[in-house]
Image (cartoon, rainbow, N blue to C red):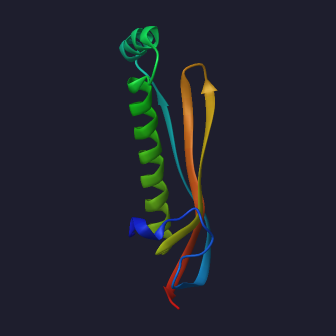
Amino acid sequence: MDKTQITTAFTLDGLRITKNLGVVRGVTVRSRSVFGNIGASFQTLFGGNISIYTQLCERAREEAFQLMSEHADKMGANAVIGMRYDANEVMAGVTEVLAYGTAVVVEKA
């Protein structure tokens, strides 16, 4: 699937939705290693961006996004509209990241 066909909007300019295939999702559950937490603890001493956690969050979102895209492909979609992210703490230090949207088939208007 062309990643430019995935949008948080509910329309794609110049395209018409011909079929709604339903909700698609990608879920990943991540935690930081003990060594990563130690490194992040040192970063918090100096303030600012805690790059170790930023990288973890970015990887988790990218993985969830990729899994959602694959789910849409399997359903026969060529676009996803209304795409969103959600995150929940499953337990202390363990977070679920969810990417979801509506799989659709689009064609030129």
Task: Count how many numbered circles sit on residues in the image.
Answer: 0
Give x and y (percent) for residue 51.
39, 26
- Tell me: 45 left or right of 81: left
Q: Residue at x 55, y 40 (%)?
A: 97
- The answer to whether residue 22 is above or below residue 13 is above
Task: Give the vertical position of 53 relative to 66 (above or below).
Answer: above
Residue 66: percent from left, percent from top: 42, 54
Relative placement, left or right, of 78 versus 99 is: left
| Image position, residue 32 (x, y; %) | 44, 22
Residue placed at 63% from the left, 34% from the top?
88
Query: What residue is rendered at 46% in x and 13% in y?
Result: 44
Locate residue 55: give its quadrant: top left
Image quarter where the N terminus lies is: bottom left
**Which residue is the extreme one toward the bottom?**
109
Residue 103: image location, x then y, percent: 56, 69
Residue under the image location 54 percent in, 76 percent down: 12
